[in-house]
Image (cartoon, helix red, strand yellow):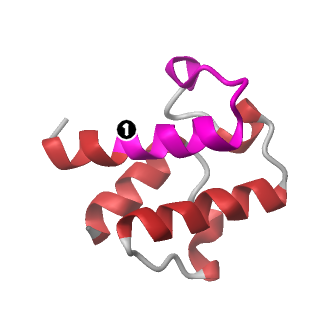
């Protein structure tokens, strides 16, 4: 994993922890649907995506939301755009 990927991963997990403090980020399975693993409703998911936008300055168009299912999907999406 590159340094950039690791920074994005760490920031993403910190956002997850802030939104779902009861979740142990180490237990997230990167290639499984993230919302179901940490039980995020649609508003929490939107807050997650907005937090990523704020942290990285990357606009995530609503049309791309459906592509962002697993933590790896989010990581790959951000790496390409950072």
- Extreme left residue here? 2
Residue 81 position within the rendered picture, expressed as x and y whole percent measured from the top left = 30, 71
> Residue at left 65%, top 65%?
66
Quarter of the rendering occupied by the C terminus: bottom left
Residue 77 position within the rendered picture, expressed as x and y whole percent measured from the top left = 40, 61
> Residue at left 72%, top 43%?
35
Residue linked to disc 1: 10
> Residue at left 72%, top 33%?
38
Q: Judge left or right: residue 41 versus residue 80.
A: right
Q: Judge left or right: residue 29 versus residue 78.
A: right
The quadrant where residue 49 appears: bottom right
The quadrant where residue 16 appears: top right
Vertical comparison of 48 with 7: above or below: below
Region in magenta: 9-28
Decide whether residue 17 is among the magenta residues. yes
Decide whether residue 15 is among the magenta residues. yes
- Specify whether residue 58 is in view: yes
């Amino acid at each position: 994993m590159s340094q950039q990927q690791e920074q994005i991963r760490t920031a993403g997990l910190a956002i997850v922890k802030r939104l779902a403090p009861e979740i142990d980020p180490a237990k997230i399975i990167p290639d499984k649907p993230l919302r179901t693993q940490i039980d995020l409703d649609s508003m929490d998911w939107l807050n997650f995506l907005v937090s990523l936008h704020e942290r990285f300055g990357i606009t995530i168009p609503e049309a791309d939301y459906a592509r962002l299912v697993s933590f790896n999907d989010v990581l790959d999406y951000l790496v390409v755009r950072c």
